[in-house]
Amino acid sequence: MSSELTDLCRYPIVQAPMAGGASGAQLAGAVAEAGGLGFLAAGYKTADGMYNEIKQLRRLTSGPFGVNLFMPQPALADPSAVEVYRHQLAGEAAWYETPLGDPDSSGDDGYEAKVAILLDDPVPVVSFTFGCPTRDTLDAFARAGTHTVVTVTSAEEAQSAQWAGADTVCVQGVEAGGHQSTHRDDPQVDQTGTGLLSLVTQVRETVQIPIVATGGLMRGSQIAAVLAAGADAAQLGTAFLVCPESGAHLLHKQALTNPLFVRTELTRAFSGRPARGLVNRFVREHGPYAPAAYPQVHYVTSGLRQAAAKAGDAQGMALWAGQGHRMARELPAGELIELLAAELEAARTALSMRSPR
């Protein structure tokens, strides 16, 4: 299916915006040059840092790209629960010889400043995580000529995004690595997410706007499956983590295919919000006790994660990964795009040959 979004690039393949350093200008530029849609992750960056990265990306490619923003989060966290978790992490701070971070470091991730920059100097696509912008904001981006994408985890969230004026929804299945982009963080529904194929079908029957499907996708045949289910494009994150252009830490890249890490799990241990990562010591020891407190817990553990990486200790790092992480292929991003496109075409051809005539 053709849409304004898929018309931007040669292939219906989107590189996921992975905050924390993985999705920088080098990766997004390589994907754009190869015919996919590359994304910069603006989360955890200052507004100036985001703008400088956009300028760097524009020097690397003339192709279309997107920028992802984190929505501001309501102040729902219980300060006493955060303080209890800080006490629990005291041993980690002593082990890594680094202080715990300030839970009140930042609240809105510079959202308004980033929106202002992107409206003043528009980019082709802007996507949103952890909620849906107001209609006024989405209308402003429409007037600027920017295609907007809202990440959703349910048909209800997709419908709300359509009503608000989003151009496209990015439908995230529970298989996805990194944070679950629920619009309301409810601990009562932890571990109850919906699988991608079922979710795409539900959303396709609920909204009329285009769909990007994401969650555990690693092969062109899987892209074919979500397109057949009703998606217009597929977004892959973990598949690009091991590319040389990815800014992910080397230990993170190695862990994806290391047999020492046998499974993934949704955990609040590192950020206070459900996020899927490889199960390591930190997740096992602290995940069951982490409060629903994002971004407070993220800032508390930030120094610990950096210290673990510096010490070469993957057991203390946030190793975000989708359920398909074992299928990661260490290829340059451009080669990976071409391989995924070839696999997609082969799957489509095989399907058409099996279809009754």
Image (tube, rainbow, N blue to C red):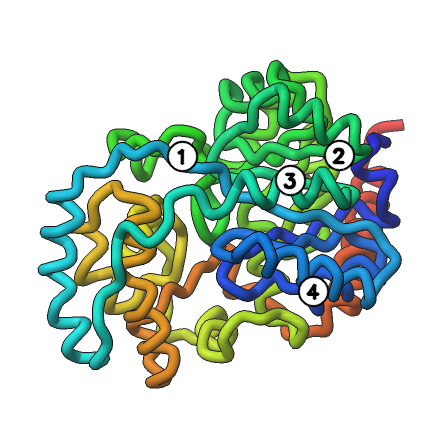
Residue 280 spot, x, y in % from top left:
30, 67
Q: Which residue is under mark 3?
A: 116
Image x and y of residue 184, in percent: 38, 29
How far apart are the two marked residues, 3 and 4, measured between alpha carbons? 21 Å
Which mark is nearer the camera, 3 or 4?
A: 3
Q: What residue would you read off at disc 4?
A: 25
Q: Position of residue 268 (x, y in %)?
A: 29, 49
> How far across and down, in percent of the image, does residue 20 sit?
49, 62
Q: Which mark is residue 147?
A: 2
Q: Marks 1 and 3, Cα distance to the nearest angstrom?
A: 33 Å
N-terminal label among 3 and 4 = 4
For marks 1 and 4, the one nearer the N-term is 4
Q: Amino acid at mark 1?
A: Gly
Disc 1 or disc 3, which is closer to the eye? Answer: 3
In the rendered view, tell whether residue 124 sits above or below residue 51.
above
Query: What crowding class fits label 1: few (fewer than 14 Cα within 10 Å), some (14-19), or many (20 or more)?
Result: some
Q: Secondary structure at mark 4?
A: helix
> In this image, 182 relative to 155: left or right?
left
What amino acid type should be assigned to the residue bearing mark 2? His
Decide which of tag 3 and tag 2 comes sooner along the chain.
3
Q: Name the image quarter holding the N terminus.
A: top right
Quadrant where the C terminus sits is top right
Amino acid found under the numbered disc labelled 4: Ala
Q: Secondary structure at mark 1?
A: loop
In the drawing, does residue 225 fall left or right of residue 151? right
* Residue linked to disc 1: 193
**Could you give the CA–CA distance between mark 3 and mark 2, rounded to whole angstroms?**
16 Å
Q: Nearer the viewer, mark 3 or mark 2?
A: 3
